Image (cartoon, helix red, strand yellow):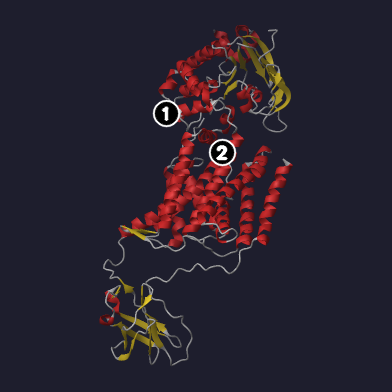
């Protein structure tokens, strides 16, 4: 990994309430073509990290770069224009808009590319093409997650941030989501994924970071972390040890 | 940031200083309605005791009726006096003492083609009080065989009035609803945008440039839109950026409402005034419903405007972005939508729509400095009834509120009509807590 990272976060300090830092100096890197998983216990600051990198939470100190260029605290719509896609954890679709309109919002900055991009994504997400006229509010949880990912892919980003894509889904839908993540990655999109389902996440990730109390505590190859006794003990729990 | 606050203060200062530049004169054309078919009475003046008399003026469609015999008898049938109406339609019969008298119009002496409107009212019993002349009114005109309109006819008429009023409430509520939907701000000063539009249009129409009302109205709506945009840009956006809480912002809107309302009072004065165009019109009879061409035009224009807003929301890029921002502001930002620009559009369009509603209401009724404030409660009802934060909810809610307030006047006093709008709101929310078109918030 000697090449320049695609996205890098260096010693990020950030938080919501003044005086309370959720992240206390957290660094992660994402390289071209990678899937990177971020795991850790509840309250470790996983979602906050992604939001801080994406400019949704103000960064108090530290630096975020995209291809070496400083993008710290840039407004999200600017980052979207520069090729970063983001799928929030909950509330990740526009419920009162139709499926098509949701995807149009994804291509808001390049409306002319909408048709072509829609056709491409219809191959990856056939269910969405079938339901294009339906309001997003009427979709099932799994379909919403698909729609959310498709929306973020409308701008053909180089990087996709996923915040707990499998949260609240049935095991079948979780499998589908992880399959899609692999598909998207193989199409050339680097993925930074926060997951509460640490095992499944590390199984498909090239590398992983373990967050603890606002800092990156461990890092390593995905499979490696899965078998690391300290990680198992602390964050994967007894379930993981049994396997 | 500081320059924006300065601009805001400057705008306010100009608003306060304005009355010195262009204060409305006191010699206004009064807003009294012209005499209709009913006879006008001479003003009751005090007279010496012992000179009590009965009198009146006989007119038909505003023309005096001459040569009609009128007799006065005591309650027991004893004759007291008789008179014939003069050239100007007046008649006067002295009576000996205060008391009750029977006044009869001799129907046979009425000119050809003129009848009593109600043939049962050819004899009236009139009290005469000491020291004052009494008036006996005989309504002439076409024979009114139908008597009072049936409940069904009144329902039809008040429904039309309700739709007319509801369309205006709907138009003014859209901005209120969308501002809440996009920024969470409860804009208590939205009524003042309604008043501002009407008053500005009045000054452009009846004062200063003396423009024709349509031109004055379009210009006033455009200026009100710019004012809305200026407010967002100079006040609300900086306050949002400083993360001022929604409750604090709400209190600021209350203060702004008071400030603007009283600045408008100083500028415009406390009277009710009318535009110089389309003031007096004969009503068209369409089946059981009568409506002036002016009101019909305003209804059609309102519908056209609402359909245009709906089309804009449904089909255009900015309209879809606007609905997206209403749905979820963070996700809109994450999709690449310039949320601040969308909010600016909401303020400009919302203020222009509110002002247009005010101009329409001022044309139908009259312009005064509190008209928007009176409308505010109904606007809030419409927005909550229809479902907070959606434009379509505001439209449907506005129509329902307009209909309920007007139709209720068939059975109860018009003074209570707003109560019925609020009762309808409470009932509707008991059945659908999210409002008529609102969607349930997902829990978890």
Placement of B313 over or under B109, stated as above or below: above
Q: In this orientation, does residue A233 appear?
A: yes
Image side of residue B213 versus residue A214, left or right: left
Q: Where is residue B436 in the image (x, y as percent from the top left)?
A: 43, 42
Report if the CB atoms under discs 2 and 1 are less than 8 Å apart: no
Report in which chain the residue with disc 2 lies: B
Image side of residue B382 versus residue A237, left or right: left
> Circle 2 sits in a helix, a strand or a loop, which is it?
helix
Which of the two residues, A88 or A209, is positioned nearer the viewer here? A88
> Circle 1 sits in a helix, a strand or a loop, which is it?
loop
Image disc number at residue B361? none
Mark 2 residue crowding within 10 angstroms, few (<14) / some (14–19) / many (20+):
many
Q: Position of residue B322 (x, y in %)?
A: 53, 36
Q: Position of residue A195 (x, y in %)?
A: 58, 18
Report in which chain the residue with disc 1 lies: A
Residue behind mark 2:
B182
Q: In this orientation, does residue B435 appear?
A: no
Residue behind mark 1:
A134
Do dots 2 and 1 share one subunit?
A: no
Q: Using the numbered discs, state the Cα–Cα distance from disc 2 to disc 1 in whole angstroms.
A: 23 Å
Mark 1 residue crowding within 10 angstroms, few (<14) / some (14–19) / many (20+):
some
Image side of residue B62 versus residue B381, left or right: left
The N terminus of chain B appears in which quarter of the rendering?
top right
Q: Residue at x 50, y 30 (%)?
A: A94
Image side of residue B304 versus residue B235, left or right: left
Which of the two residues, A225 or A27, is positioned nearer the viewer here? A27
Placement of B114 over or under B352, stated as above or below: below
Which of the two residues, A175 or A128, is positioned nearer the viewer here? A128
Among the 4 quarters of the image, the one containing residue A213: top right
Q: Which residue is drawn at 44% across and 58% down?
A: B417
Q: Where is residue B38 in the image (x, y as percent from the top left)?
A: 38, 73
């Amino acid at each position: 990994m000697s090449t320049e990272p695609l996205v890098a976060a260096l010693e990020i300090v950030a938080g919501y309430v003044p005086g309370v830092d959720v992240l206390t100096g957290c660094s992660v890197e994402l390289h071209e073509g990678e899937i990177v998983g971020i795991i850790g216990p509840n309250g470790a600051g996983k979602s906050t990290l992604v939001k801080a990198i994406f400019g949704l939470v103000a960064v108090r100190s530290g630096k975020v770069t995209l291809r070496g260029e400083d993008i710290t605290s840039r407004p999200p719509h600017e980052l979207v224009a520069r090729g970063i896609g983001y799928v929030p954890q909950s509330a990740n679709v526009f419920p009162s808009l139709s499926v098509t309109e949701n995807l149009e919002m994804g291509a808001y900055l390049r409306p002319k590319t909408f048709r072509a991009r829609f056709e491409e994504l219809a191959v990856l997400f056939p269910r969405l093409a079938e339901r294009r006229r339906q309001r997003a509010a009427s979709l099932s949880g799994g379909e919403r997650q698909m729609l959310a990912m498709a929306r973020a892919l409308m701008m053909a980003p180089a990087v996709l941030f996923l915040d707990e894509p499998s949260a609240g889904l049935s095991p079948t839908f979780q499998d589908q989501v992880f399959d899609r993540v692999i598909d998207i990655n193989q199409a050339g999109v680097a993925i930074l994924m926060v997951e509460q389902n640490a095992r499944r996440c590390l199984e498909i990730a090239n590398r992983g970071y373990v967050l603890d109390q606002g800092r990156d505590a461990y890092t390593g190859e995905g499979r490696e972390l899965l078998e690391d006794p300290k990680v198992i003990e602390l964050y994967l729990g007894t379930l993981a040890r049994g396997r | 940031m500081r320059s924006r606050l300065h601009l805001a203060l400057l705008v306010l200062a100009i608003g306060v200083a304005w009355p010195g530049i262009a204060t409305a004169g006191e010699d206004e054309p009064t807003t009294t309605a012209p005499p209709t078919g009913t006879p006008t009475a001479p003003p009751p003046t005090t007279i010496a005791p012992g000179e009590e008399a009965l009198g009146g003026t006989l007119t038909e469609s505003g023309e005096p009726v001459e040569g009609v015999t009128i007799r006065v008898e005591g309650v027991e049938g004893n004759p007291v006096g008789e008179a014939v109406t003069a050239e100007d339609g007046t008649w006067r019969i002295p009576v000996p003492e205060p008391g009750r008298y029977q006044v009869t119009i001799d129907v046979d002496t009425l000119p050809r083609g003129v009848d009593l409107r109600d043939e049962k009212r050819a004899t009236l019993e009139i009290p005469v009080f000491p020291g004052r002349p009494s008036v006996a009114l005989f309504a002439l005109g076409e024979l009114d065989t139908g008597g009072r309109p049936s409940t069904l006819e009144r329902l039809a008429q008040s429904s039309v009035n309700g739709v007319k009023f509801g369309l205006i409430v709907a138009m003014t509520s859209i901005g209120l609803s969308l501002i809440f939907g996009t920024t969470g701000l409860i804009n208590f000063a939205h009524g003042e945008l309604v008043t501002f539009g009407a008053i500005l249009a009045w000054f452009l129409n009846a004062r200063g440039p003396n423009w024709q009302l349509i031109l004055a109205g379009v210009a006033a709506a455009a200026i009100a839109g710019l004012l809305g945009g200026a407010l967002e840009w100079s006040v609300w956006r900086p306050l949002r950026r400083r993360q001022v809480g929604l409750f604090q912002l709400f209190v600021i809107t209350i203060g702004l409402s008071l400030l603007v309302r009283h600045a408008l009072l100083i500028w415009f004065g406390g009277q009710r005034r009318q535009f110089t165009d389309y003031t007096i019109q004969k009503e068209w009879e369409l089946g059981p419903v009568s409506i002036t061409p002016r009101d019909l035009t305003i209804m059609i224009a309102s519908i056209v405007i609402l359909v245009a807003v709906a089309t804009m929301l449904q089909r255009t890029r900015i309209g879809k972005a606007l609905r997206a921002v209403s749905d979820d502001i963070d996700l809109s930002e994450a999709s690449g939508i310039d949320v601040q620009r969308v909010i600016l559009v909401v303020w400009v369009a919302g203020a222009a729509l509110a002002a247009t509603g005010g101009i329409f209401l001022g044309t139908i009724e009259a312009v005064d400095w509190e008209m928007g404030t009176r409308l505010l409660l109904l606007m809030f009802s419409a927005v909550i009834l229809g479902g907070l934060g959606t434009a379509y909810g505001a439209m449907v809610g506005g129509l329902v509120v307009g209909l309920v307030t007007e139709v209720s006047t068939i059975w109860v006093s018009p003074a209570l009509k707003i109560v019925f709008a609020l009762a309808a709101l409470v009932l509707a929310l008991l059945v659908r807590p999210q409002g008529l078109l609102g969607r349930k918030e997902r829990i978890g």
